[in-house]
Image (cartoon, grey):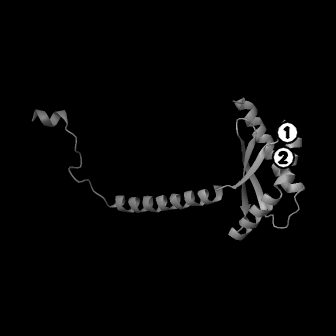
Amino acid sequence: MGDQGRVRRMSVRVREIVADVIERQVKDPRLGMVTVTDARLTPDLHEATVFYTVWGDEAVRAETARALDSAKGVIRSAVGRGTGLKHTPSITFIADAIPENAKHIEELLERARLVDERVQQLAQHARPAGDEDPYRHPEDAAE
């Protein structure tokens, strides 16, 4: 089992290297507006999973996935040189679901806001179901 601190540092380094290589070296026209969001390494540092997002529709995302897959060798070579690891990790690219999750959360928040507004409207004209003051008072018990 590897040192967790070292794995975290190497993950950050791999993320930086991959982002730099995609921006500066990979000249594939299929590559869209890519943002590398995270990189995770296995504890033995042999496998890296790189998460990315792409600006655009589903067709752009598919083309970008193919472009990243074809550039995997160049990116892996740069990671090997940049990290100085004895064994260069194999790289897997995964499209990050952050935009879809954020959109879903925004929809849920909007739905909750509408429900809250409706509750506020109903509460404006609401009256208590029982007495105005449902608590017992000691002076009432003495009578």
The percent coordinates of residue 58 (x first, y second) are: 68, 68
- Residue occupying the point 76% across, 55% down: 35
- Residue occupying the point 74% across, 61% down: 65
User: Hey, what amino acid is under mark 1?
Assistant: Thr
The quarter in which the C terminus is drawn is top left
- Residue occupying the point 32% across, 61% down: 125
| 90, 138: nearer the viewer | 90
Numbered label tally? 2
- Of the two numbered discs 1 and 2 in the rendering, the one whose residue sits closer to the viewer: 1
State yes or no: discs 1 and 2 in contact (Cβ < 8 Å): yes
The percent coordinates of residue 52 (x first, y second) are: 73, 54
Check disc 1 and report the residue beneath it.
83
The quarter in which the N terminus is drawn is top right
Q: Quadrant of residue 135?
A: top left
Q: Secondary structure at mark 1?
A: helix
User: Hey, what amino acid is under mark 2?
Assistant: Ile
